[in-house]
Every structure is written in structure tokens, then in C-alpha cells.
Image (cartoon, rainbow, N blue to C red):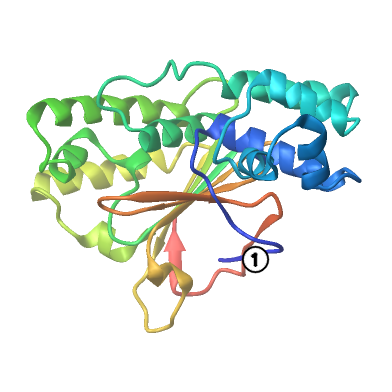
Amino acid sequence: MTARSCVQFWFVTGTPRAQELAAALREAIKASPLSVRKLADQLGLSHSTISQWSNGHRVPSVHDVVALLSEMSVAGETADRIVELAELANAPADRLVPGVTQAQAAIMEYERDARRITEWSPDLIPGLLQTGDSARVILGEASPGQVQMRLALRAGRREVLTRAEDPPHLLALVGEDAIRWCIGSPTVRNHQLRHLLKVSEIDNVTLQVVRRGHDFHVGLLGPFVIYDFAAQRPSVVLLEHHRSSAFLHNEHWRITRSPRKRSASGR
């Protein structure tokens, strides 16, 4: 699997709603005959303010978005869509609860909104496919209260795959080591493997096990998740590690999948 970007990557620093608004503003500004400096002068703002709006570092108010669209002569359905995005981006983050980080909230929102989720996990079973017992072992460093809260969050996240209306398609590429590694106890591992067999029978879940080999591939650089959404919304890439995570997106992002090699097998 390879990825190619036509322009540049953008680090997502805000919520998914703010990121989507920033992408829409970038497209509108790019299509406008007016430069960012000219727009800033006409609105009585600094050009850096508009740049921060379009790169997602700051969320403009709905009033600011309406004024910006008016200066660019953006109207009709396009303007209505961008104004709606501004209203959503400025709405309270009602899903955040104590102990849930912004990154965790973003992951849950991406999983909820995505049409397709592609996850490469070389060393661990992906979170959406973990049993509660496996997750409890992995989260063992946290306090008992935190463990219970995170287990509840993971259980809620798993429901996205089996919801009745428009569930996302999950392509889980799991490393052979993740399958063979005994986490917790043989009983926990066997229960996890039985769960993988069961979940692989769901129509919208594709599970593939990637064998160890001697050839280099980009997956050796680390795990990642790609969230693909409906039309006009850019894909998002999650780079997640033990103590940190980063979101990348690009409205010109293209994903290409090479023919499957003999070193990969799966159900």
C-alpha cells in the first residue's frame, strides 16, 4: 500500500469539525481571485489571521466566515455548506467528558463519520478489534479508574462497526507478531483470536494478516490509520504512538493500493 500527496501535508491541530472548516476555507480562498493579503485588508484583519483560519490553527466565528465568504463572492450551496461547518466548529464539544483527551475525542469522531477506515497495526490488535480482556492488559499502566473509563470508551467505539445505519468499512492490516504474541495469558489470547475470527465474518470488516518477511515496506516505519470520508471531505491520517499522536490531512490526498503480495494473507 502506498500513499502519494500532490501538494503538502497539514497537521490537524483542532477538532475534526474545525479541520473540515479549515479545508473548506482553503478551497474557497484558492478559487478566489483575491489574495489573502487583499482579503485581510478589506476585512480589517491581518493576513496571518486568515492564514490561521485556513490552516486550522484558529477557528473563526460564524460572523467572520460570513464576512469572508461575502468578500470572495461565495454564495449558494457552497456558502451554506461552509457556514454550516462554521456553526458546527463553534459548537460546544459536548462529547468530551472528564479524562477524555482532545485526541481521543477526535478519534471517536473520525470513526463515527468515516466511510472507510484502513488501519495498519504491526504489533498489536487494532483497538476496534480488541476484546475487553486484551485491552485491560494493554491499559494496565493506568489507574483502576482510568482503566475502567477507557474500557468503556473502547466498548462504545466498537459499536461503530455494527451499527444499523451506514457503518464504516474497516480494513485491518495486522502484523503476524500481533497474532502470535501472547498478551496477558493464553486464555486471553485465545479469546482474542476467537473474537477476530467472529468479527472477520462481518460484511463491512476485512481482516488481513501480514506475514513477517525480509522485504522493506513503509509499514515498518510504524502503525497508522487512514480515515476516508464522504465527498468533499479530505482524508485524515492518524499516526499514533504510546505517548503521543498526530493527525495529518490533505485535500489532495490520494491512496493507491498495490496488488497483494504473497507475503500477505488474511480472512
Name the residue furthest bottom.
214
On the image, the x and y values in percent for residue 232 come to: 74, 39
On the image, the x and y values in percent for residue 63 come to: 70, 18
Depth check: 85 or 184 in front?
85
Position of 165 compared to 184: left or right? Answer: right
| Residue drawn at (83%, 48%) of the image | 35
| Residue drawn at (78%, 46%) of the image | 37
Q: Which quadrant would residue 141 be assigned to in this image?
A: top left
On the image, the x and y values in percent for residue 184 come to: 10, 48
How many numbered callouts?
Answer: 1
Image: 80 above or below 115: above
Name the kind of residue labelled 1 in the image.
Arg
Residue 139 visible at all? yes
Depth check: 90 or 103 in front?
90
Residue 78 visible at all? no
Q: Secondary structure at mark 1?
A: strand
| Residue drawn at (43%, 67%) of the image | 219
Image: 207 above or below 93: below
Depth check: 173 or 78 in front?
78
The residue pinned by badge 1 equals 4
**Dot 1 crowding, Cα within 10 Å, few <14, some 14–19, many 20+:** few
| Residue drawn at (80%, 21%) of the image | 80
Q: Quadrant of the N terminus?
A: bottom right
On the image, the x and y values in percent for residue 115 come to: 60, 37
